[in-house]
Image: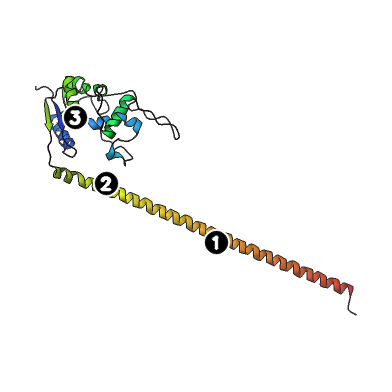
């Protein structure tokens, strides 16, 4: 029986690392690990959303798991697999309600956030808490894995070498720029259209709300004007009635003083 394989897949965004990595992992019966998604998982309990320019407009997590276990792995599921880089704060939801300050990131979590957001290099201390588990701990050690998206830089490749974390195979996906553009542009355009439609719908809602408020204010002013006119008419009627009453009293008084013969 051959030893469990440790295979790395690297390449530019849009080269198909996830697609081919998952297909290979399923065929070979090994774990598929997305390094970038694992970084997201390590801090999302505090950030509440994925970090990075491509996620700036997204409000919810896509729900994809960083580590996919092979089919039929006895006694193991995605919830029970040790993922590497488990921290004390992982999985803890913020206990504060509205108005309470957000949870602060630890130094390790901040280094992960900076890597995802600005592309800053991950310190070796952070990598030590993530990568060795996939080589040395079960069930990865006896099952094998395909690691997607690592190493990304020369420094990360040197880290693997200096740490004794050697892959059996490294696959570099080389793709023409036009292929990547054709692959990535349609979903990006669809995402842009959805954002545009959402903005237009919100503008239309705001316009409808403003019109409704304006109509309500106009109707209120009309009612107030009508009430004011009605009040003036009532006041005028009362004055006429009082004047008429006084005239009648005066006439009655004169008749009483000067009765006709």
Please state the horizontal and vertical placement of residue 243, each as a whole percent of the image.
75, 68
Crowding around mark 2 (Cα neighbors within 10 Å: few <14, some 14 to 19, many 20+) is few
* Label 1 secondary element: helix
Inspect this view and state whether residue 71 appears: no
Q: Which residue is mark 3?
A: 153
Please state the horizontal and vertical placement of residue 32, each as a whole percent of the image.
19, 30
Where the N terminus falls, by quadrant? top left
Q: Up-down: is 261 above or below 98?
A: below
Residue, x 32% and y 32% (percent of image)? Answer: 44
Where the C terminus falls, by quadrant? bottom right
In space, the residues marked 3 and 1 are separated at their CA atoms by 71 Å
Q: Which residue is mark 2?
A: 191
Tell me if 141 is positioned left or right of 233 in this view: left
Please state the horizontal and vertical placement of residue 88, each as a whole percent of the image.
33, 23
Residue, x 64% and y 62% (percent of image)? Answer: 231
Residue, x 28% and y 39% (percent of image)? Answer: 53
State yes or no: discs 3 and 1 in contact (Cβ < 8 Å). no
* Label 3 secondary element: loop
In space, the residues marked 1 and 2 are separated at their CA atoms by 46 Å
Give the number of marks.
3
Q: Which residue is mark 1?
A: 222
Tell me if 18 is positioned left or right of 60 in this view: left
Crowding around mark 1 (Cα neighbors within 10 Å: few <14, some 14 to 19, many 20+) is few
Q: Earlier in the sequence, mark 1 or mark 2?
A: 2
Residue, x 55% and y 61% (percent of image)? Answer: 222
Please state the horizontal and vertical placement of residue 228, each as a whole percent of the image.
61, 61
Q: Earlier in the sequence, mark 2 or mark 3?
A: 3
């Amino acid at each position: 029986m051959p030893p469990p394989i440790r295979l790395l897949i690297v390449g530019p965004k849009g080269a198909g690392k996830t697609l081919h990595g998952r297909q290979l992992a399923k065929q070979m019966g090994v774990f598929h690990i997305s390094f970038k998604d694992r970084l997201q998982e390590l801090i999302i309990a505090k950030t509440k959303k994925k970090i990075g320019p491509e996620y700036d407009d997204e409000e919810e997590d896509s729900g994809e798991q960083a580590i996919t276990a092979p089919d039929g792995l006895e006694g193991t599921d995605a919830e029970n697999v040790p993922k590497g880089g488990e921290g004390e704060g992982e999985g803890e939801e913020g206990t504060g309600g509205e108005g309470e300050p957000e949870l602060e990131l630890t130094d390790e979590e901040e280094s992960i956030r900076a890597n995802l957001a600005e592309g800053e290099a991950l310190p070796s201390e952070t990598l030590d808490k993530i990568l060795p588990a996939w080589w040395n701990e079960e069930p990865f050690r006896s099952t094998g894995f395909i690691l997607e998206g690592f190493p990304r830089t020369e420094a990360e490749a040197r880290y693997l070498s200096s740490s004794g974390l050697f892959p059996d195979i490294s696959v570099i996906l080389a793709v023409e720029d036009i292929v990547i553009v054709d692959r990535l542009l349609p979903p990006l355009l669809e995402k842009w259209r959805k954002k545009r439609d959402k903005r237009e719908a919100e503008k239309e809602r705001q316009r409808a709300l403003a019109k409704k408020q304006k109509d309500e204010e106009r109707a209120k002013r009309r009612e107030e004007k009508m009430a004011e006119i009605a009040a003036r008419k009532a006041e005028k009627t009362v004055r006429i009635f009082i004047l008429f009453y006084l005239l009648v009293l005066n006439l009655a008084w004169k008749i009483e003083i000067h009765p006709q013969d």
